[in-house]
Amino acid sequence: MKLSRPASWFLLAFGVWSWVIWITFAKNLWQDGSGLAFDDAGDPTAYFWVHLLLAVTSLILGTVVGAIGLRGVRALRREE
């Protein structure tokens, strides 16, 4: 299958965007002072674990999508 130039760049940009957004989210989750992520004893809550799993999953998927986009961009450059 051959990806178009716009599709390849979109997938690559989506992968980079995922890393920027979800790393920022994970940092904010770790530093949460609202009491949602950590209880009074400082132990992680279910909220923390669910959102950490969401962030990790999104990073993995963003990496895969970005890698597909990168392969598409590289293939298009080799053709030129």
Image (spheres, rainbow, N blue to C red):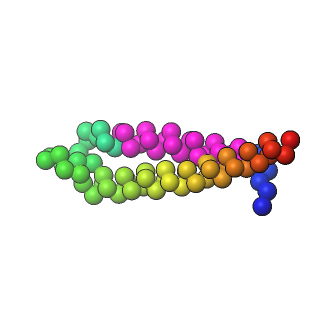
Q: Position of residue 14 (x, y in %)?
A: 61, 46
46 on left or right of 55: left
17 on left or right of 12: left
List the single residue furthest toward the right: 80
| Range of magenta residues | 8-28
Q: Residue at x 77, y 54 (%)?
A: 3
Tell me if residue 42 is in the magenta stretch.
no
Q: Residue at x 84, y 46 (%)?
A: 79
42 on left or right of 22: left
27 up-or-down from 37: above or below = above
Q: Position of residue 59 (x, y in %)?
A: 49, 50
Quadrant showing the N terminus: bottom right
Q: Position of residue 22 (x, y in %)?
A: 46, 44
Q: Residue at x 23, y 51 (%)?
A: 44
Q: Position of residue 54 (x, y in %)?
A: 42, 55
Q: Residue at x 73, y 45 (%)?
A: 74
Tally of numbered discs: 0
For the stretch drawn in magenta, the main secondary structure is: helix
List the single residue furthest toward the left: 41
